[in-house]
Image (cartoon, grey):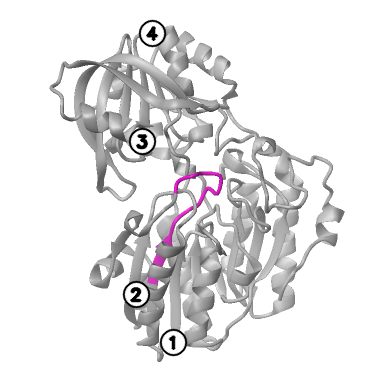
Amino acid sequence: MKILEGSFQCEANTFCSQRAGIEDFERYDGEALLTKMAATPIFREAGAQVVPLLYASALPSGMVTREAFEYYKERFVEMIEREKDADGIYLYLHGSMYVEGLGSGEEWLVKAIRQVTGEGIPIAIALDYHANLSEGFLGQVNAVQGFRTAPHTDHDDTERRAARSLLACIQKNACPHPAVFRIPFLGGDASTTDKEPFVSITKRLQELDGEEGVISCAFFNGQPWYDSAYTGNCAVVSCLDSKRAQKEAMSLAKMFWDGRENLKLEHAMTVKEAVRASLEQKEGLLFVTDSGDNTTAGADGEGTLLLREYLKKDTKGVLVCGVLAADVVNDLLKEEIGTIKEICLCKGCREKQRIETTCQVVLKKKGIVYGWAGDEVGEGVLLAAGNTDLVLTNARAAFTTPEHFARMGVSLEDYHVVVIKMGYLFPKLKTFTENFIFALTPGVSSNDFAQLEYQRLKKRMYPIHMDITWEEIKNQQEVRL
């Protein structure tokens, strides 16, 4: 038994002006790829020969350039053409890669693969919880598994489930097509899986995992900052019996719809309220999340809106962390510690989030910007602007773990308020504190979806349209078997 294995990922925020190019992808191949992917041991335990394709992964970003997508797609196709005797293909994708001029990168990748393999070889996919899945994509694959946690903690478990789904297809000589049931819902950062209806949905998915005849089952929240006709939640189920797959997908969707009102943003405040409330707390540490400039959702991270508000207050113990300002940082890296200098952020800008901000700073430290995968992606500086400290970076960053702060030389024990560019609080930051404020800032990752200028999402979506009914959803459904 021969199985081909690879990964191609970039979560796209289509409202961002930036683009992900060829060099923005972290790449692995050969044994390094096989070691990196959690599916490998499952296949090897089953006695399979595992052939590495390519691992290419980029940070959440704007759209992927057509050049970058074609470059990596062709690498996959070339390798697969050399392995036409494969019994199955396993891919770890994101599910919300949007390519300039094409749309769903996942769709065009699997279509290109199918041109080589035909329909007789099963393809199993592991996806992010925030996947937006086109009909063209789902029509080309046989088993789909997705993360069941947000914030995400089950990456490896999802890979292992997808691997077992592929083995089931091979062992049963089956290539089922998944049934999908779509829910016109924009979840965003309110859709964390520690609350209903996701607790019940996860329990049901776990039950289905062990039931005879079920190849794969998943529920996806979608990614609301992704403008497409297929943006939104969906349940996806593959069974040996196609009618059962349809029934189970609809049941999962109804479970979600009936519990949707439980999905509320926690600790959410306006900008003014967030600044005031954070400065009123006197003990311990509190995070303030700049949700409209959330780099984990693809935003640029250049926003100065919250920085300006805290500079006005000039209160000790405040750190505004992870503002992207490449030119400013590169200039400051040439200076000695203790240098006093006037800097200008977002020069010439007058946007809601990016506003020209000038301040005099003292250079306190220089550090390393840590990437998602534990690699060094750039450099940063820790500055003092009066009583307020700030971290500027020359590479887009997300300070999601203790290691990110440590590599910058930042001690969180020195602060009472730390502003970070994200939405919900990531699990490893909760080791410091579970106290946080979700600042409802504007921007390309805003949770006020009505302010986003959708062009391709030409349908009624909850909660923009609060009067959507279950009957309306059922009537508009295109359940494909």
Relative to 363, residue 93 above or below: below
Choose between 256 and 348: the one closer to the eye. 348
Kind of residue sitting beneath label 2 = Leu
Choose between 476 and 249: the one closer to the eye. 476
Residue ranking furthest to the bottom:
85
Question: Which numbered dot is residue 53?
Answer: 2
Residue under label 4, please give it: 315
Kind of residue sitting beneath label 1 = Asp
Choose between 421 and 336: the one closer to the eye. 336
The earlier-in-sequence mark between 1 and 4 is: 1
Residues in magenta, as a range: 6-18
Residue located at (76% from left, 47% from top): 258
Residue under label 1, please give it: 87
Give how far apart the Cα atoms at labels 2 and 1 are: 14 Å
Q: Which one is in front in this view, the residue at disc 3 or the one at disc 1?
A: 3
The earlier-in-sequence mark between 3 and 1 is: 1
Q: Quadrant of the C terminus?
A: bottom right
Give how far apart the Cα atoms at labels 3 and 1 are: 41 Å
Location of residue 86 in the rendering, given as x and y in whole percent from the top left corner: 41, 87
Give how far apart the Cα atoms at labels 3 and 2 are: 31 Å
In screen coordinates, is 44 left or right of 307?
left
The reply to whether residue 58 is visible in this rendering is yes
At mark 3, the secondary structure is loop
The earlier-in-sequence mark between 2 and 1 is: 2
Relative to 271, residue 114 above or below: below
Whether the magenta-drawn stretch holds residue 53 is answered as no
Instruction: Tell me if label 2 and label 4 are in contact, CB under 8 Å.
Output: no
Residue under label 3, please give it: 399
